[in-house]
Amino acid sequence: MSMDMDADPPFPDAAAPDALIDHDRSIEYWSSVSADTTGMLGGYPQTSRIDLQSSSNFLTKLRRARSTLPPKQPLPPLDRVADCGAGVGRITKEFLLKVSRRVDVVEPVKKFTDELVQSLGSGEWAGDGDGGAGNTTGQVGEVINLGLQDWVPEVGAYNVIWNQWCLGHLTDVQLVAYLRRCKEGLKKAEEGAQSWIMVKENLSTDFKGMDIYDEEDSSVTRSDEKFRQLFKEAGLKIVATELQKGFPKELFPVRIYALKPE
Ligand SMILES: C[S@@+](CC[C@H](N)C(=O)[O-])C[C@H]1O[C@@H](n2cnc3c(N)ncnc32)[C@H](O)[C@@H]1O
């Protein structure tokens, strides 16, 4: 996943750029990257803070809009969430652990999750409990070293399944199948739970609206139209969406989508 638009020109014969995705090649690329925020964010670590702040605000707004609590009363912590394609746990540590009692981590590259587990255990990182959910600092639950094409979420388990800057590693067919499994993995609305699938990804800027293949890490950058089509195919509806503001101009636009079963 290149962050900057100039780094990778669109693949020339891009009829189905996702057909070029090669998982072994992706893993080889990510295994060569440093296990830190700079590695995760393609050399733009300074975007992390604003990204996480916007994500936190987005989730809080979503939860508040569906809560009967008075505006000043803190939201209770969520029960269980998953950070998918989590890398070194940038999102887990700085956001999800502050809003949920338990965060399961799904990430195919073990050196990244080793770094996460080590940093949590060493006390290098201490949650500051300012996540707006009753100052909770949760625990990392399961650490699952799998690609999302192979991960089957436990049925009815999750309040939030967070997918950021990793879905470009799945082909369109894999992504639809994965999103269907995520749909089953959400806590059931009829039991009164707040639950959403979150997708936060770069958007293609190709002038013909094509998805863009990135040879470096063997991923695709999809258009907004393509995402919407795939969500529909998976039986999901968009309940809220926002464009990321405040990123450097040379980066791809980034959009977050909150999804629920149709
Ligand atoms: C750009 S990093 C993003 C990490 C994290 N989501 C964040 O925003 O800090 C992309 C991550 O996707 C992971 N990845 C690669 N192939 C994947 C796959 N098939 N399924 C899930 N994650 C994958 C990489 O190992 C890497 O950790």
Image (spheres, rainbow, N blue to C red):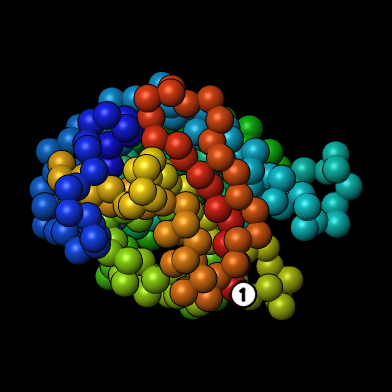
As rendered, which of 5 and 130 lies closer to the eye? 5
Identify the residue at image location x=65%, y=53%.
Answer: 240
Q: Is residue 77 above or below residue 123?
A: below
As rendered, which of 24 and 255 lies closer to the eye? 255
> Which quadrant of the rendered structure holds the N terminus?
top left
Question: Residue 212: x and y, percent?
Answer: 28, 48
Question: Residue 10: x and y, percent?
Answer: 24, 43
- Asked if one can make out residue 202 in the rendered structure from this viewpoint, the answer is yes
Q: Which residue lies furthest to the front in this view?
A: 208
As rendered, which of 255 and 161 lies closer to the eye? 255
Is disc 1 surrounded by few (<14), some (14 to 19) or many (20+) residues within 10 Å? few
Identify the residue at image location x=36%, y=48%.
Answer: 208
Amino acid type at circle 1 is Glu
Question: Residue 21: x and y, percent?
Answer: 18, 58
- Reading the image, the residue beneath label 1 is 262
Identify the residue at image location x=11%, y=52%.
Answer: 25
Question: Residue 5: x and y, percent?
Answer: 31, 32
